């Protein structure tokens, strides 16, 4: 290929990528609906909408991450490499039905359960506390635990601190959405009645739990949105764990081993958020909750 033709082809490829990126950005920020993009793609398969991969379109929809997209495409019978404009008539029909149904459900639903999980010391509690202080419309689920309170933790606000006997009684009465033993030591559980009541009232609920709990919630409530909080780097995670000074050296080493295992499970989640900055990470979580009026909420300095 002549050099001038190669340069022209390169410029065209860059322009095409930018055009597709603009389409995805419009869907992500709700300036365009996904069904509108799909219909434009089917009208002109050579357009930016038409050359967009189905996977990219679905991932750009707020609140839908790679793990959920993979399940959706499998259910719709659409291959990962398929472009929206290249779908067959039956695939178009299935995708259109799904997109219209999802948008109708989103319009009718004002509440959502968002599950926030991640490796130890990533800052889940700090992000949750920031949300509690700055976004009062978000209801944070309070877990029960058999571990003793840490300095500054308040019973009924941060956790319900219960004895092993009381925890056993709650299990017997079927009061937990999920429960598990964490770090081979203390038990944690999520009381279900308050969550069910809040969702029925149209309130959004944020649930901060460990990896085991998140998996259990997915089994019990498949409609929940699972969010994985990531550290900026592994070195930063180590610094945060060792710097807080709440565990012995042996306990720190054990928790870091656990963190490595937990990080490997991140692709099971719908959305990933990197905790570079607590305020920004909290805002991203709140946006996923779709709480009315939270898009303009300000962080107090």
Image: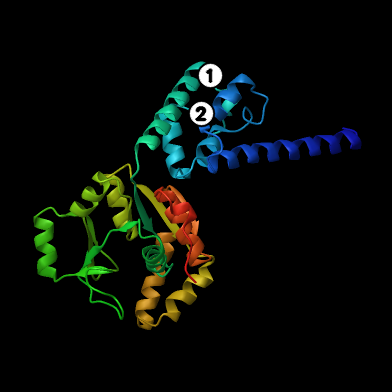
Q: Is residue 160 above or below residue 216?
A: below
Give the residue at x 39% y 60%.
Answer: 135
Q: Nearer the viewer, mark 2 or mark 1?
A: 2
Secondary structure at badge 2 equals: helix
Q: Residues within 10 Å of mark 2 (few under 14, many from 20)?
A: some
Give the residue at x 25% y 63%.
Answer: 143
x then y, percent, for residue 282: 45, 61
Give the residue at x 25% y 46%.
Answer: 201
- Judge left or right: residue 247 versus residue 201: right
Please count the marks in the image: 2
Going from the N terminus, do you reach mark 2 or mark 1 first?
Answer: 2
Residue at the top extreme? 89
Disc marking residue 88: 1
User: In the rendered structure, are the residues bearing label 2 and label 1 in contact, judged by CB atoms less than 8 Å apart?
Assistant: no
x then y, percent, for residue 207: 32, 57
- Judge left or right: residue 147 versus residue 44: left
Between 13 and 26, the one lying in front of the other is 26
Q: Is residue 60 above or below residue 239?
A: above
x then y, percent, for residue 241: 43, 75
Between 101 and 136, the one lying in front of the other is 136
Disc marking residue 143: none
x then y, percent, for residue 300: 47, 68
In this figure, which residue is indicated by the disc labeled 2? 35
- Judge left or right: residue 84 versus residue 6: left
**Which quarter of the picture shows residue 155?**
bottom left
């Amino acid at each position: 290929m002549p050099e001038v033709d190669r340069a022209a082809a390169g410029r065209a490829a860059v322009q095409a990528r930018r055009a597709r990126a603009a389409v995805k950005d419009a869907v992500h920020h709700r300036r365009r609906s996904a069904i509108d993009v799909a219909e434009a793609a089917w009208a002109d398969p050579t357009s930016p909408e038409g050359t967009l991969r189905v996977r990219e379109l679905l991932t750009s929809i707020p609140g839908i991450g790679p793990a959920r997209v993979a399940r959706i495409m499998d259910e719709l019978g659409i291959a990962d490499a398929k472009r929206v404009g290249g779908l067959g008539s039956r695939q178009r029909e299935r995708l259109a039905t799904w997109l219209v149904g999802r948008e109708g459900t989103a319009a009718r639903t004002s509440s959502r359960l968002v599950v926030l999980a991640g490796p130890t010391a990533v800052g889940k509690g700090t992000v949750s506390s920031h949300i509690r202080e700055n976004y009062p419309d978000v209801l944070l689920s309070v877990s029960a635990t058999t571990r003793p309170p840490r300095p500054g933790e308040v019973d009924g606000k941060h956790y319900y601190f219960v004895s092993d006997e009381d925890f056993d009684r709650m299990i017997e009465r079927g009061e937990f959405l999920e429960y598990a033993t964490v770090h081979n030591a203390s038990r944690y559980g999520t009381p279900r009645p308050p969550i069910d009541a809040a969702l029925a009232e149209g309130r959004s609920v944020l649930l901060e739990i460990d990896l085991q709990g998140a998996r259990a919630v997915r089994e019990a409530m498949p409609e929940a949105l699972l969010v994985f909080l990531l550290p900026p780097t592994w070195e930063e995670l180590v610094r945060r764990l060792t710097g807080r000074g709440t565990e012995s050296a042996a306990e720190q080493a054990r928790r870091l081993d656990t963190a490595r295992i937990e990080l490997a499970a991140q692709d099971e989640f719908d959305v990933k958020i990197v905790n570079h900055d607590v305020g920004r990470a909290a805002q991203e979580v709140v946006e996923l909750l779709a709480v009315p009026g939270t898009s303009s909420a300000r962080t107090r300095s």
